[in-house]
Image: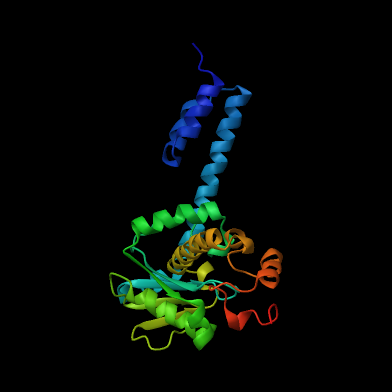
Amino acid sequence: MEQKISEIKGLFQAANTDRLPELISMYEQDERGGVQAVITSARKKLVALEKEKARIEIMKEYEYRYAQAGYICGIDEVGRGPLAGPVVAGAVILPKDCQILYLNDSKQLSEKKREELYDVIMEKAVATGIGYASPERIDEINILQATYEAMRAAISNLAVKPDILLNDAVTIPDVDIKQVPIIKGDAKSVSIAAASIIAKVTRDRLMVEYDSIFPEYGFASNKGYGAAVHIEALKKYGPTPIHRRSFIGNFVD
């Protein structure tokens, strides 16, 4: 009895990508249009996968360059620009044979993909660290110095001491580890991209929690950035304890 097209489609949908070539070989002689459409879709998925593997390989340039140095740690921050909330830094040491796909600058990824990758990074990384600088600290020492402080905290929170740091654009003062600043590093290094993702997810989750405390400001959606609803609430209700006083002078007296 001939297998139904819907059953074949279900097999392809349930299969992981490693099994797709075998399934294509099994069904490619089936001339029914529905089956051929399933096979065409599977082949496109395989082509896209190879393209992604090639992209990730390019993003390992610095990891390969400094492989002999020892433990390589990517460093990145999120939250330098918002009017409210902390700045958060991430530090990630990936294994040398890291095969995590879809790593990229966290801003280029959907929230769903960031959340998925966060779980994979936390599972597969040799070590991860998160550092914070509070709104009060940002007001006290300025955003740049607070960012450096958060980065140093992220490094100190690693369970393994790195031998070299790949940083997104900056050189962090008062750190006794070799540093390599890379412009737009979160799009050029898998280690920095991973740090960008865990920092972004950590900060976004925190801002969602703040939204339940201060619902008028829309923190769950704007994450503390200067969205219209946020600025309107700031003018109407005034600042919350998580607002950066040094950032909001244009909106409140």
Figure quadrant of residue 118: bottom left
In this view of the protein, which residue sits in the foreground, 174 or 105?
Answer: 174
Residue at 59% of width from left, 22% of height from top?
Answer: 31
Residue at 34% of width from left, 83% of height from top?
Answer: 177
In this view of the protein, which residue sits in the foreground, 7 or 155?
Answer: 155
| Screen quadrant of the C terminus | bottom right
x and y percent of residue 237 in the render? 66, 69
Q: Residue furthest top?
A: 1
x and y percent of residue 84 in the render? 57, 72
Name the side, left or right, on which 162 lies relative to 203: left
x and y percent of residue 171 in the render? 46, 84
Name the side, left or right, on which 54 lies relative to 126: right
Q: Residue furthest front?
A: 237
Residue at 54% of width from left, 77% of height from top?
Answer: 183
Is residue 179 at all visible to an observer of this figure? yes
x and y percent of residue 88 in the render? 47, 72
How many numbered circles does the render carry?
Answer: 0
Q: Work out whether 144 lies above or below 214.
A: below
Residue at 46% of width from left, 52% of height from top?
Answer: 116
Is residue 169 at all visible to an observer of this figure? no
Colour mode of the rendering? rainbow
In this view of the protein, which residue sits in the foreground, 210 or 29?
Answer: 210
In this view of the protein, which residue sits in the foreground, 22 or 118?
Answer: 118
